[in-house]
Image (cartoon, grey):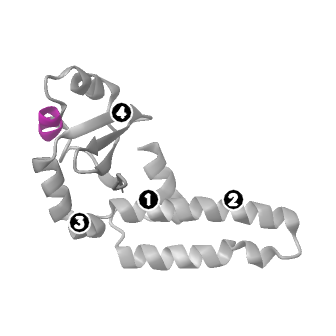
């Protein structure tokens, strides 16, 4: 969750920002910090490259958890969490990564370690997640397994 706050602060947005507003803010911020603006200033250019990378990362992350994005993929997400059991899961820095048998992977932000331990020790991680993870934490799609 710390990362989420840092990203919002970097782009100077709150959790009510729309996708359209986020895109405009992102473009304007990138114009101000684009490395090409520092053609004759090598140190400035390097700093701008680092800041640009951070801005791009923040933008993509915030787009992925935005309610408009989640609404767009709600049907796929709902089908995954109701019909596809968990293949694998792990916790890394309060982010629970869940890989489903259908190939979809989702990240749940701010999951406490004790909740993760309960999930590990549960008879059915899929049932535990349906009861205690899904709907309780901010999530984002983290990818899909590659087809053979």
Residue shown at the point (20%, 57%) measured from the top left: 77
User: How much space separates mark 2 and mark 4, taking CA atoms?
Assistant: 29 Å
| SS type, badge 4 | strand
Asked if marks 4 and 3 touch (Cβ < 8 Å), the reply is no
Mark 3 lies on a secondary structure that is loop
Q: Residues within 10 Å of mark 4 (few under 14, many from 20)?
A: some
The percent position of residue 30, horizontal first and vertical second, equals: 61, 74
Nearer mark to the viewer, of 2 and 3: 3
Crowd band around label 3 with a 10 angstrom C-alpha radius: few (<14), some (14–19), many (20+): few
- SS at mark 1 in the image: helix
Kindly indicate whether the residue at mark 1 contacts the one at mark 3 (C-beta within 8 angstroms): no
Residue displayed at 23% across by 65% down = 73
Q: CA distance from mark 1 to mark 4?
A: 20 Å
Q: Percent x, y for residue 62? A: 41, 61
Classed neighbour count for the residue bearing mark 2: other residues with Cα under 10 Å, few (<14), some (14–19), many (≥20): some
Secondary structure mostly seen in magenta is helix
Q: Earlier in the sequence, mark 3 or mark 1?
A: 1
Please state the extent of the stretch shown in magenta in the rendering: 126-131
Residue 50: mark:
2
Which is more N-terminal, label 2 or label 1? Answer: 2
Residue located beneath label 4 in the image: 90
Q: Earlier in the sequence, mark 2 or mark 3?
A: 2
CB atoms at circles 1 and 4 under 8 Å apart?
no
> Answer yes or no: do the residues labelled 2 and 4 have beta carbons within 8 Å?
no
**What residue sits 29% from the left and 35% below the top?**
88
How much space separates mark 1 and mark 2, taking CA atoms? 17 Å
Q: Which of pointers 1 and 4 indicates the residue nearer the eye? A: 4
Work out whether mark 4 precedes mark 3 in sequence or the reverse, and give the earlier one. Answer: 3
Q: Quick one: 126 or 133, which is closer to the camera?
A: 126
The residue sitting at 76% across, 78% down in the picture is 37
Q: Earlier in the sequence, mark 1 or mark 4?
A: 1
The residue tagged 3 is 73
């Amino acid at each position: 969750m710390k990362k989420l706050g840092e990203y919002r602060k970097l782009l100077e947005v709150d959790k009510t920002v729309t996708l359209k507003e986020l895109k405009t803010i992102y473009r304007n911020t990138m114009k101000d910090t684009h490395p090409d603006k520092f053609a004759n200033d090598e140190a400035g250019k390097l700093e701008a490259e680092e800041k640009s990378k951070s801005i791009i990362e923040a933008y993509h992350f915030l787009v992925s958890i935005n309610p408009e994005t989640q609404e767009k993929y709600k049907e796929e997400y709902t089908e995954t969490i109701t019909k596809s059991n968990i293949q694998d899961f792990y916790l890394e820095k309060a982010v629970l990564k869940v890989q489903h048998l259908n190939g979809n992977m989702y990240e749940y932000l701010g999951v406490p370690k004790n909740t993760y331990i309960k999930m590990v020790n549960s008879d059915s991680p899929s049932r535990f997640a349906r009861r205690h993870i899904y709907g309780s934490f901010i999530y984002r799609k983290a990818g899909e397994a590659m087809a053979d």
